[in-house]
Image (tube, grey):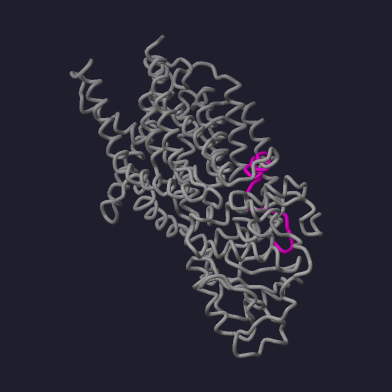
Amino acid sequence: MKPEVRALLLAGGLLVLVKALVLASVLTPAPHTGGDNAAYLSLGYALTQGLGYVELWEPLVPPHTKYPPAFPLLLAGLMAVGVTTWAALKAGMAVLLSGAIILVFAWVGARRGAMAGLGVALLVLLSGGWLDASRWILSEPLFLILTFLSLWAADRGGLVVAPGLLGTPGTGSGLREEGASRGRADSPEAGLPPHAGWVVAAAAAALLALLTRSAGLPLVLALGGILLLSRRTLGLALFGGAAVVAGVGWAFRARQGGEGAYQSEFWMVNPYEPELGTIGVMDLPFRIWENLGIYLGAVLPGEWWPASGALLAAFGLLLAGMALAGWVLRILRGEVGTAELFLPLYTGLILLWPPVWSGDRFALPLYPLVLFYAGEALTAGMGRFRGKERTGDWSRLLGLGAGTVAFLLLAVPALPGWISTAEDAAACRAVADEDVFRCHPPAVAEFREAARWAGTHLPEDAVVLNRKPRIFYLLGGSRGRIFPFSRDPAVLLEEADALGARYLLLGFPDGVTLSYLPAVVEGRPGAFCVVEAWGEGTTLLGILPPGEREGTQVTRCPPDYRLDPSQPPLHGPGDPQRDGRHVPLLLQRPSTLPRDLQ
């Protein structure tokens, strides 16, 4: 067996063992309290019921135009074979992320050898963002596996800039010599004829990434760019045609949905505070600068280092600076593949988005790239330090030592974060045998009880304004919409009247609810009445008709705000005894859906 193959197998085997241990330790059955999880599950459920790609939680049940359909289709497939528990769905996400980590190992290993691939893959595994992605029902794991499948397959297919095209001295023969010296005849640096199958795989993965998240556009552009720069005109034509069909088709649907698409939120100062207004083109440089500060000063270095303030920002600048240097070195050497184009395109995209969205969820695809290019800069620096007179075992030992130190500088500070997450997950698993919501604080449990109660005690056409309408629907079956982000009671009442909404839920433990709803109710108490309450912080209010809102205090609601107790539940969970472990919506039989959806 060749030494390179032996090293690849040993490193890959070690990665599989460590990865299984780490991901299993952080797996938690507790549902995420973000609305995106519930939206994806509801969209997948709608597909399984033959209702189309629609927003079941919305009063008008409109077509969905915000999230591309690939991930909901995957969830629909899982539901179709009987997967209904939170734990099983989350395990599926962990499996997807596991595949993405293997592909990171394969991509880096093909470029720099098995040990480099192992180091980058382990550091990615220990990053807080990638660990979290394995724990929630979100599109990130699927997007990551498709992104790195495309990057790896593109390299395997020999997609590099054509020799001499960029006028760089390293392009062409220099890369062939480098690839041969590493013993990887199938690497893109080897300069061998591309394999059409790998190119097709790269193209298919890129298109599926675009249909998983709109942020897949930079990957599509990068692959199209490398097809152009490598002079693969036929491949470019075929890929471009497919991308136009997929991208333009989805963009057209999104445009039809208006406010449901990301485009309408892009120009807002803060999509969660629309009263702040919008920005113009001239404001984009300031947004980029603000996002740079967030990503370099907190998000990127915080994935491994628990420090804060100036020390964390300095580490972020160092890591980003090394990555930039490594990327430039590859460009100057003519080693330009899909990843070299993807990095600036994707970075530019996330720097343009509203700063309130800035966080690790959007930066996850960049972590392996940043680590790889920082390693390139470190390798180049060590090469200059060693000098030509230091060769043989000493040179290799020095390089290995530098790489090990760099790895430990990131991995060791990240261990406490992993251990803490694993301990929290273990504590949750210990108490969540029958009810996964036991892992959440009382305010979240009260919100769940309110949703369940509404699903069995409110009229079939009830519309409930609340902070998390997608979760509210998933847990109880009552439709709703998020309340207007305004402290003016007239704004909320106008929205309620337009929707026919007769209910407002005061509850959910976040600052948005507390920022708006108390002021609304205090400003117009006579417009509301009490339907039911749970604990100390969750109350379901009724919204009185326009002619009955002149009172000075909140009173008890009339009987018609509740379903007649003699009538059976119309759209509540299928079996309330089971929904502690199962996603309640997935237990509904088609006959229990509202009549307009049957």
- Quadrant (top left/top right/bottom left/bottom right) for the C terminus: bottom right
Quarter of the figure that contains the N terminus: top left
State the extent of the magenta-drawn residues as a range. Answer: 58-78
Q: Residue at x 81, y 59 (%)?
A: 596
Q: How many marks?
A: 0
From the viewer's side, name the closer residue of 272 and 123.
Answer: 123
Q: Does residue 197 appear in the picture of this structure? A: yes
The picture quadrant where one finds residue 318 is top left
| 301 relative to 338 in the view: left or right | left
Q: Observer-nearest residue: 217 or 554?
A: 554
Residue appearing at x 43%, y 24% in the figure: 12
Q: Is residue 528 above or below residue 461?
A: below
Image side of residue 217 versus residue 296, left or right: right
60 drawn magenta? yes
- Residue 410 at what x, y percent from top left? 31, 40
Rendered location of residue 529, percent (x, y): 64, 81
Decide whether residue 447 is among the magenta residues: no
On screen, residue 189 above or below 469: above
User: In the rendered view, would you say 103 is above or below 438?
Assistant: above
> Residue 273: image x %, image y %?
52, 68
Find residue 526 and report its horizontal and vertical position in percent: 63, 86
